[in-house]
């Protein structure tokens, strides 16, 4: 169903239409090289992120002490920590101490059963280790986690207290022997991620989530699952030491560590919150709602307000076209305070900041936004009052800018028309109505064919008939 209808199809109400990946990402080849930048400015960084197209920052590691750090240096510095033995871990050896030496001196082949299920070019690769410092616990006890966070430095392109805190709290480290690989998968992140290569180089292949109209056809997002359905990478890249690749929710990615590397390589992965890939989320919302990011419950509430301009509990999805039109007109009139039939960034900020939020008892941090009180933000950390005030300003500005980018689509002129708001709100209602209706069927134990019949009914009714 991804046809070259143009963005007008979105504004004209094609709620389940999605652009072809080649058109949206402006790709001219079957597999393209990931774009590379240096000395990226804040404006360019934000613009690239909002489109959701992966890119490499060549000078990401400038001035960072951990660039060049070897596996052995982590062994000496954090011997009390434990990391996960990916792919080959049994109950006995699931976690491995950084204090040992075998992990960076000896290869760890994959089990034969796993090799038979892998693509031929990956079958003989070795398995990596991943150290989830962000999770704490026995992987990184409090004193170890604090020491890592003191040593960790943010790259220059991350700015603001919100992003610095998120990046520091979400850090994890990947250790690979030569000829190592991570199988293709899509993470459960709802926000952008960065992988900074600290030692050696790594080969990447990436692919957007395939279009999904029937839930039974949704691919397995876990490691290697996509190989059993449709693994067709659109990008490839070699990320060198000191470089970072920025990637986005629902981008399947596979990595390999070629043999011409140091004996053991290191990379760190972390996330940031501002901005979000708003245009990418808007373009592919129907598929995202059928993916693990929704059915595992990670991103449903976090992306809600870009279309609705309301908190999750304040809007229930509906298929009533008149109700959607009334809601759209009501919100537009409330936001367009000067009555010029265009919503600007300043009007969005004013509207969002006027909300009366239901904050936890004793939290006097102001009305907007409240998202950093949820478990999906900052892991187990909560801001103190002075820090929270600064973060509120950053989150308000970022939320308003991201909302504008989400709604402003045809043409992209820096303001939102009533047609653009209605199209986004209508898409949100219909996509989520389908989701809620199928979830009710599943909860009642309905057979798969009933769920599929309902999904097909939505497509027949809300997708242009000549596009089916």
Image (cartoon, grey):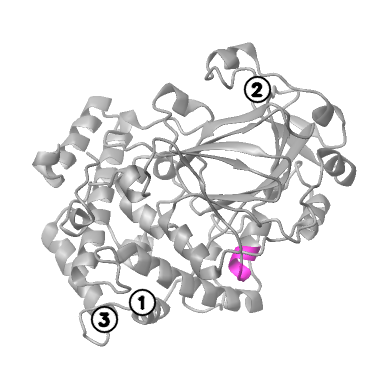
Side (left or right) of 54 relative to 216? right
Please give the residue where the numbered disc 2 appears in the rendered image.
Answer: 125
* Callout 2 crowding tier (Cα within 10 Å): few <14, some 14–19, many ≥20: many
Callout 3: helix, strand or loop?
Answer: loop
Callout 2: helix, strand or loop?
Answer: loop
Percent x, y of residue 439? 31, 40
Question: Which residue is more in the foreground, 6 or 452?
Answer: 6
- Give the alpha-carbon distance from disc 2 to disc 1, as whole Å: 50 Å
What residue appears at the point 32 percent right and 78 percent down from the top-left corner? 344
Question: Which residue is more in the foreground, 149 or 345?
Answer: 345
Magenta region:
159-164
N-terminal label among 3 and 1: 3
Please give the residue where the numbered disc 3 appears in the rendered image.
Answer: 336
- In the picture, the disc for residue 348 is 1
Q: The N terminus is located in which quarter? A: top left
Residue 162 covered by magenta stretch: yes
Question: Which residue is more in the foreground, 299 or 363?
Answer: 299
């Amino acid at each position: 169903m991804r046809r070259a209808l143009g963005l007008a199809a979105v504004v004209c109400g094609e709620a389940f239409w999605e652009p072809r990946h080649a058109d949206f990402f402006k790709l001219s080849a079957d597999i393209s090289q990931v774009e590379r930048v240096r000395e990226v400015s804040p404006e360019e960084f934000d613009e690239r992120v909002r489109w959701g197209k992966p890119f490499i920052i060549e000078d990401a590691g400038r001035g960072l002490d951990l660039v060049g750090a070897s596996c052995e240096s982590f062994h000496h510095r954090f011997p009390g920590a434990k990391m996960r033995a990916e792919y080959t871990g049994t109950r006995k050896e699931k976690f491995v101490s950084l204090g040992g030496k075998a992990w960076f001196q000896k290869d760890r082949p994959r089990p034969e059963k796993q090799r038979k299920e892998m693509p031929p070019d990956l079958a003989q690769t070795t398995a990596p280790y991943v150290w989830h410092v962000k999770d704490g616990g026995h992987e990184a006890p409090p004193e170890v986690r604090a020491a890592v966070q003191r040593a960790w430095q943010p790259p220059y392109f991350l700015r603001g207290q919100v992003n610095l805190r998120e990046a520091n709290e979400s850090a994890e480290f990947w250790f690979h022997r030569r000829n190592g690989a991570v199988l293709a998968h899509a993470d459960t992140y709802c926000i952008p991620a960065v992988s900074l290569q600290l030692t050696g180089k790594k080969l990447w292949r990436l692919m957007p989530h395939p279009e999904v109209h029937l839930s039974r056809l949704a691919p397995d997002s876990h490691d290697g699952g996509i190989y059993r359905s449709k693994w067709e990478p659109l990008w490839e890249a070699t990320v060198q030491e000191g470089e970072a690749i920025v990637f986005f929710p629902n981008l399947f990615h596979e990595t390999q560590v070629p043999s011409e590397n140091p004996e053991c390589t290191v990379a760190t992965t972390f996330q940031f919150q501002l901005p979000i890939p708003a245009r990418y989320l808007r373009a592919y919302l129907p598929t995202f709602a059928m993916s693990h990011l929704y059915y595992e419950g990670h991103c449903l509430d976090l992306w809600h307000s870009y279309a609705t301009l309301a908190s999750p509990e304040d809007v229930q999805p509906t298929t009533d076209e008149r109700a959607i039109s009334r809601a759209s007109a009501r919100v537009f009139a409330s936001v367009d305070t000067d009555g010029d039939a265009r919503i600007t960034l300043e009007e969005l900020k004013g509207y969002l900041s006027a909300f009366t939020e239901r904050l936890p008892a004793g939290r006097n941090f102001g009305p907007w936004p409240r998202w950093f009180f949820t478990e999906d933000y900052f892991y187990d950390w909560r801001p103190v009052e002075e820090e929270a005030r600064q973060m509120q300003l950053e989150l308000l500005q970022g939320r308003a800018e991201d909302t504008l980018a989400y709604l402003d689509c045809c043409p992209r002129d820096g303001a939102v028309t009533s047609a653009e708001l209605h199209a986004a709100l209508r898409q949100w209602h219909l996509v989520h109505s389908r989701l809620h209706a199928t979830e009710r069927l599943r909860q009642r134990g309905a057979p798969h064919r009933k769920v599929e019949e309902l999904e097909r009914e939505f497509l027949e009714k809300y997708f242009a008939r000549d596009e089916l």
